Amino acid sequence: MALLVNIGHDGWYRDRELAAELRNLSPGADIRTLEEPGDLAEITMLAVSGLADDLPPQLPNLALVQKLGAGVETIVAHPALAPHVQVTRLKPLEPAREIAQYCLAYVLQGQRNILAHAANQARASWESLEPKENHKTRVGVLGMGHIGGETAALMRDLGFEVHGWSRSAKDMEGVTCHHGAESLEPMLGICDYICAILPSTGETRGLINAQTLAAMKPGATFINAGRGDLVDEAALIADLDRGHLGHAVLDVFCTEPLPEQDPLWAHPQVTITPHISGWHLGEALQDVVENFRRLGAGEDLLHAVDRQRGY
C-alpha cells in the first residue's frame, strides 16, 4: 500500500514539500508524488485538495481519498470516484483559527472605520469618526461546526453579541443559537456582520440569494469564508448596487480563480481575497498519516465523510 500526494492546484503547498512533511511524521511510510509515482496499482490512499478528473481511473486499488481541508463537495460527487472509495476530511485547529481571525479582521475593519479613514487620508481630510463598540454590535455566524464554533467563540470573547445559525440545534455558552430555515432570515435581520462558514451541500448552495440578502440588516457587512456556491453573486451585486448591504468581503467564489472580467473585482463595496482565509494545516498533518495507518490496519478512519450527505 502507498499514499499518493497530489494537491491538485497551484498557490498553496507543493506536492513534494507536503510529502516530505508527511514522511517526517511517519518514517518508513510509502508516500509518493506524481513526480515519482511508481506502480500506480500500489496506491491505496490519495491526499488531495482538488481531485483531478483523470486521476481516480489510474488507481485501480484506491480505497481512500483524504481531503487536505474541510470542504469535500467536489470529491464526494466526483464522477470518476468509485462508490466504494471512502472520503475523509481534516478538522485542524490551526486553519479554523485562521478563518476565525480572518473574519475578525474584517469585522474590526468596520468597527474602527478603517476604510473611511483610508478614504479621508487620500483627500487629506482630518475627520474624527467614532469607533463602534463591540458590546453594542451583533455578529452572526452561519455554520456552527468546527470552524464556525471557533469564529463564534473568538467574537464572543472579544465582547460582541454573537448569534449562530445552523441546520440543526446547537448549544454554545455565550452565543445565541438559532437553527432551521424559519430562523435564518430573522437572525440575518438583526446582525451588523454576517460571517458565512457553511459547507457546500444541497441545502446551502444558493442560500444567500435575493431573498436572504434583502432580509439582512441595512448597511450590514457580509463576509464569506465558507464556500463560493453559497452566494448568488449576481444577486449580491444587485443588492450592493441598490445600497442595501454596506460591504461584502469574499474569500471564496463560484468560479476560482475569479475571472479577470468578473464585475466583483471592480465593485467599490466588495473586498476580494484569493481563498486564503485558512492556510496552514498544522497538527492536522498527523491525521493524514494516522488515516494511512488505519486504512492499512482496517480500523475506523478519522473524520470520515458520508458521501450521500456530503459532509
Image (tube, helix red, strand yellow):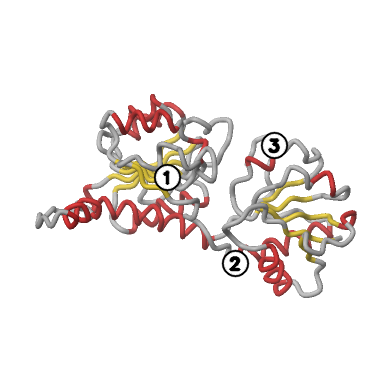
The residues tagged by marks 3 and 1 sit, at their Cα atoms, a distance apart of 25 Å
Q: Are marks 3 and 1 in contact (CB under 8 Å)?
A: no
Q: In the figure, is residue 248 to the left or right of 311? A: left
Percent across and percent down for residue 21 are 67, 71
Percent across and percent down for residue 48 are 69, 53
Give SS at disc 2.
Answer: helix
Q: Earlier in the sequence, mark 2 or mark 3?
A: 3
Residue at x 27% of width, y 39% of height: 246
The residues tagged by marks 2 and 3 sit, at their Cα atoms, a distance apart of 28 Å
Q: Earlier in the sequence, mark 1 or mark 2?
A: 1
Location of the C terminus (image quadrant): top right
Q: In the figure, is residue 9 to the left or right of 84? A: left
Asked if one can make out residue 206 in the rendered structure from this viewpoint, the answer is: yes
The furthest residue to the front: 261
Residue that numbered label 2 is attached to:
283
Q: Sort mark 3 into few (<14), some (14-19) or many (20+) by Cα contacts within 10 Å.
A: some
Give SS at disc 1.
Answer: strand
Percent across and percent down for residue 94 are 52, 63
Q: Are marks 1 and 2 in contact (CB under 8 Å)?
A: no
